[in-house]
Amino acid sequence: MAKDQSFDVVSQVDMQEVDNAVQQAVKEITQRYDLKDTGSTISLDKTAGTVTVSAPSDFISKQVVDVLAGKLVRRSVDLKALSWGTTEAAAGGTVRTTAQIVNGIEAELARKINKDIRDEKLKIKVQIEGDKLRVFSPKRDDLQTVIAFLKDKDYGIPLQFTNYR
């Protein structure tokens, strides 16, 4: 019997690229005429996986988020990787917006992806392994069909397909 082919479905973000994008965005908001003296800041906490934007008003906060989004797109970081929270009031009359960086696939979403793949009625096996899914099949064509199917679906997080063998 032939050995099964497999690949992994993961959701990972390159934190170095996020760090570079944040640094570029900070540089731009200190140099841009309309944002220069506003006192807006962007900070990245790598250990907690959060990006925090502080600004004097909601309007300026949205402008800073747009600048950051542009830098992330240029560095090939999917914007779905950031889950933005609500804007909240902070000290000194400023507002703060925090985004959580999505790393890994949550168990509930992994079960939903697993169910969607199984509903395709292909001869495949899916295993949930922590924060990733491993898909097995004796035929590579079935695996490529699953990859195309998952690329068409929107699960709210960026999906990558790795370890294809």
Image (tube, rainbow, N blue to C red):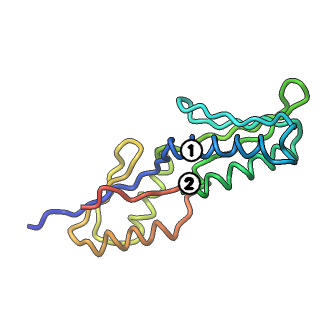
Residue 60 percent location from the top left of the image? 85, 45
Q: Which residue occupies the foreground of this view, 86 or 82?
A: 82
- The residue that label 2 is drawn on is 75
Q: Residue at x 46, y 48 (%)?
A: 12
Residue 3 percent location from the top left of the image? 14, 63
Residue 129 position by quadrant: top left
Q: Looking at the rendering, in which quadrant would you find the C terminus? A: bottom left
Residue 46 percent location from the top left of the image? 55, 33
Q: Which residue occupies the foreground of this view, 8 or 162?
A: 162
At mark 2, the secondary structure is loop
Q: Which residue occupies the foreground of this view, 57 or 117?
A: 57
Decide: marks 1, 2 in contact (CB < 8 A)?
yes
Residue 120 percent location from the top left of the image? 40, 71
Q: Looking at the rendering, in which quadrant would you find the N terminus? A: bottom left
When the figure is inspected, residue 104 is found, relative to residue 115, above or below; the finding is: above
Q: Residue at the left extreme?
A: 1
The amino acid type found where label 2 is placed reads Arg
Q: Residue at the right extreme?
A: 93
Is residue 65 found left or right of 73 in the rendered image? Answer: right
Instruction: Give me the C-alpha separation between circle 1 and circle 2.
Output: 8 Å
When the figure is inspected, residue 91 is found, relative to residue 57, above or below; the finding is: above
**Which numbered disc flags the more N-terminal residue, 1 or 2?**
1
Q: Which mark is residue 2?
A: none
- The residue that label 1 is drawn on is 18
Q: Residue at x 25, y 66 (%)?
A: 137
Is residue 7 found left or right of 64 in the rendered image? Answer: left
Is residue 115 found left or right of 141 in the rendered image? Answer: right
Residue 45 position by quadrant: top right
